[in-house]
Amino acid sequence: MRARPVPIEFREGNAAELPYEDGSFDFVVCRAAFKNFTDPAGALREIHRVLVPGGQASIYDLRGDASREDIAELVRSLNLSRWNAWWTWLTFRFFLLKNAYTKEAIGRLAAQSPFGVGDVVESGVGFDLRLSRAASPS
Protein backbone atom coordinates (compact mmCIF):
# COMPACT_ATOMS: atom_id res chain seq x y z
CA MET A 1 0.00 0.00 0.00
CA ARG A 2 1.31 3.41 -0.95
CA ALA A 3 1.51 6.15 1.65
CA ARG A 4 -0.66 9.19 1.05
CA PRO A 5 0.88 12.64 1.35
CA VAL A 6 -0.03 14.58 4.46
CA PRO A 7 -0.67 18.29 4.05
CA ILE A 8 1.66 20.39 6.20
CA GLU A 9 1.42 24.08 6.89
CA PHE A 10 4.22 26.12 8.45
CA ARG A 11 3.59 29.38 10.29
CA GLU A 12 6.02 31.70 11.97
CA GLY A 13 4.98 33.17 15.28
CA ASN A 14 5.70 33.90 18.90
CA ALA A 15 5.29 31.02 21.37
CA ALA A 16 3.38 33.35 23.70
CA GLU A 17 1.03 34.44 20.86
CA LEU A 18 0.43 31.37 18.71
CA PRO A 19 -1.16 32.10 15.32
CA TYR A 20 -3.88 29.45 15.71
CA GLU A 21 -7.54 29.39 16.74
CA ASP A 22 -8.65 28.14 20.16
CA GLY A 23 -8.89 24.34 20.28
CA SER A 24 -6.95 23.75 17.05
CA PHE A 25 -4.88 20.74 18.15
CA ASP A 26 -5.24 17.36 19.82
CA PHE A 27 -1.52 17.25 20.65
CA VAL A 28 1.25 19.86 20.88
CA VAL A 29 4.98 19.08 20.96
CA CYS A 30 7.75 21.51 21.85
CA ARG A 31 11.25 20.09 21.39
CA ALA A 32 14.52 21.68 22.59
CA ALA A 33 13.17 25.24 22.53
CA PHE A 34 11.29 25.94 25.77
CA LYS A 35 14.39 27.04 27.70
CA ASN A 36 14.86 29.84 25.15
CA PHE A 37 11.37 31.37 25.41
CA THR A 38 11.28 34.91 26.82
CA ASP A 39 7.73 34.34 28.15
CA PRO A 40 7.46 30.67 29.19
CA ALA A 41 4.29 31.27 31.23
CA GLY A 42 2.71 32.87 28.15
CA ALA A 43 3.80 29.90 26.03
CA LEU A 44 2.07 27.48 28.43
CA ARG A 45 -1.10 29.60 28.36
CA GLU A 46 -1.05 29.51 24.57
CA ILE A 47 -0.42 25.77 24.40
CA HIS A 48 -3.41 25.29 26.72
CA ARG A 49 -5.55 27.63 24.59
CA VAL A 50 -4.84 25.89 21.27
CA LEU A 51 -5.49 22.39 22.65
CA VAL A 52 -8.93 20.83 22.38
CA PRO A 53 -10.52 19.78 25.69
CA GLY A 54 -8.82 16.50 26.57
CA GLY A 55 -5.81 17.40 24.38
CA GLN A 56 -2.25 16.74 25.49
CA ALA A 57 1.16 18.37 25.16
CA SER A 58 4.76 17.28 25.64
CA ILE A 59 7.63 19.67 26.19
CA TYR A 60 11.00 18.00 25.70
CA ASP A 61 14.08 19.95 26.74
CA LEU A 62 17.35 19.80 28.63
CA ARG A 63 17.44 19.47 32.43
CA GLY A 64 19.25 22.35 34.08
CA ASP A 65 20.50 19.99 36.78
CA ALA A 66 21.90 17.35 34.40
CA SER A 67 25.10 16.00 35.93
CA ARG A 68 28.51 16.02 34.30
CA GLU A 69 28.22 12.26 33.99
CA ASP A 70 24.82 12.56 32.24
CA ILE A 71 26.43 14.92 29.73
CA ALA A 72 29.49 12.70 29.31
CA GLU A 73 27.27 9.65 28.70
CA LEU A 74 25.31 11.49 26.02
CA VAL A 75 28.50 12.69 24.32
CA ARG A 76 29.97 9.15 24.39
CA SER A 77 26.81 7.81 22.76
CA LEU A 78 27.30 10.18 19.81
CA ASN A 79 30.60 8.50 18.79
CA LEU A 80 32.26 11.81 17.95
CA SER A 81 35.93 12.45 17.32
CA ARG A 82 37.90 13.49 20.39
CA TRP A 83 37.85 17.18 19.41
CA ASN A 84 34.11 17.18 18.59
CA ALA A 85 33.29 15.28 21.78
CA TRP A 86 35.21 17.80 23.88
CA TRP A 87 33.53 20.76 22.14
CA THR A 88 30.07 19.16 22.44
CA TRP A 89 30.58 18.51 26.17
CA LEU A 90 31.63 22.13 26.71
CA THR A 91 28.68 23.40 24.69
CA PHE A 92 26.22 21.41 26.80
CA ARG A 93 27.91 22.18 30.11
CA PHE A 94 28.45 25.92 29.71
CA PHE A 95 25.98 27.14 27.09
CA LEU A 96 22.95 24.93 26.51
CA LEU A 97 22.20 24.12 30.15
CA LYS A 98 22.55 27.75 31.26
CA ASN A 99 18.85 28.55 30.72
CA ALA A 100 17.50 25.03 31.16
CA TYR A 101 14.89 24.26 33.82
CA THR A 102 15.29 21.86 36.71
CA LYS A 103 12.53 19.31 37.34
CA GLU A 104 11.29 21.42 40.26
CA ALA A 105 11.30 24.70 38.30
CA ILE A 106 9.42 23.33 35.28
CA GLY A 107 6.96 21.64 37.64
CA ARG A 108 6.28 24.95 39.42
CA LEU A 109 5.78 26.70 36.07
CA ALA A 110 3.27 24.03 34.99
CA ALA A 111 1.44 24.30 38.35
CA GLN A 112 1.02 28.07 37.83
CA SER A 113 -0.29 27.59 34.28
CA PRO A 114 -3.87 26.85 33.16
CA PHE A 115 -2.88 23.17 33.15
CA GLY A 116 -2.51 23.32 36.94
CA VAL A 117 -0.16 20.35 37.00
CA GLY A 118 2.31 18.55 34.81
CA ASP A 119 4.07 15.21 34.96
CA VAL A 120 7.84 15.63 34.60
CA VAL A 121 9.71 12.54 33.40
CA GLU A 122 13.50 12.78 33.49
CA SER A 123 15.69 10.93 31.03
CA GLY A 124 19.45 11.39 30.65
CA VAL A 125 20.17 15.10 30.16
CA GLY A 126 16.53 15.92 29.44
CA PHE A 127 12.98 15.89 30.63
CA ASP A 128 9.52 15.44 29.16
CA LEU A 129 6.88 17.69 30.69
CA ARG A 130 3.55 15.98 29.99
CA LEU A 131 0.49 18.21 30.12
CA SER A 132 -3.23 17.58 29.64
CA ARG A 133 -6.04 20.03 29.10
CA ALA A 134 -9.07 19.02 31.14
CA ALA A 135 -11.89 17.53 29.14
CA SER A 136 -15.09 19.56 28.95
CA PRO A 137 -17.74 18.48 31.44
CA SER A 138 -20.44 16.33 29.85
Image: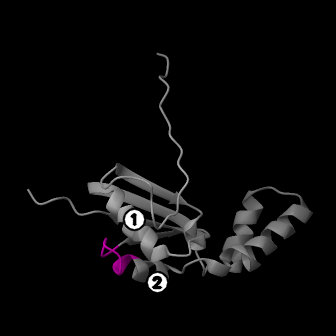
Inter-mark Cα distance, 2 to 1:
22 Å
Q: Position of residue 12 (x, y in %)?
A: 55, 53
Give, as a three-letter code, the residue at label 1: Glu
Q: Which residue is mark 2?
A: 104
Confirm whether the magenta stretch covers residue 115.
yes
Q: Which residue is pictured at 63% across the width and 79% down the height?
A: 99
Residue under the image location 47 percent in, 56 percent down: 29
Percent coordinates x, y for residue 19 in the rendering:
44, 55
Kindly state the secondary structure of the residue where label 2 is placed.
helix
Instruction: Residue lying at the far left in this picture: please name it.
Output: 138
Identify the element where label 1 is drawn: helix
Query: Residue drawn 38% across and 52% down?
Result: 27
Q: Residue furthest top?
A: 1
At which x and y percent is residue 101? 55, 79
Which residue is painted at 87% across and 62% down in the image?
Answer: 84
Q: Nearer the viewer, residue 126 or 57?
A: 57
Question: Mark 2 or mark 1, which has the lower sequence index?
Answer: 1
| 10 Å crowding of disc 2: few (<14), some (14-19), many (20+) | few
CB-based contact (under 8 Å), mark 2 and mark 1: no
Residue interval drawn in magenta = 110-117
Left or right: 54, with 57 as reference point: left
Left or right position of 88 against 53: right
Q: Quadrant of residue 35?
A: bottom right
> Which quadrant of the figure contains the C terminus?
bottom left
Label 1 environment density (alpha carbons within 10 Å; few <14, some 14–19, many ≥20) = many
Q: Nearer the viewer, residue 41 or 82?
A: 41
Residue 16, numbered label = none
* Camera-side residue of 16 and 96: 16
Q: Amino acid at mark 2?
A: Glu
Circle 1 residue = 46
Label 2 or label 1, whichever lies nearer to me, is 1
Q: Main secondary structure of the magenta part?
A: loop
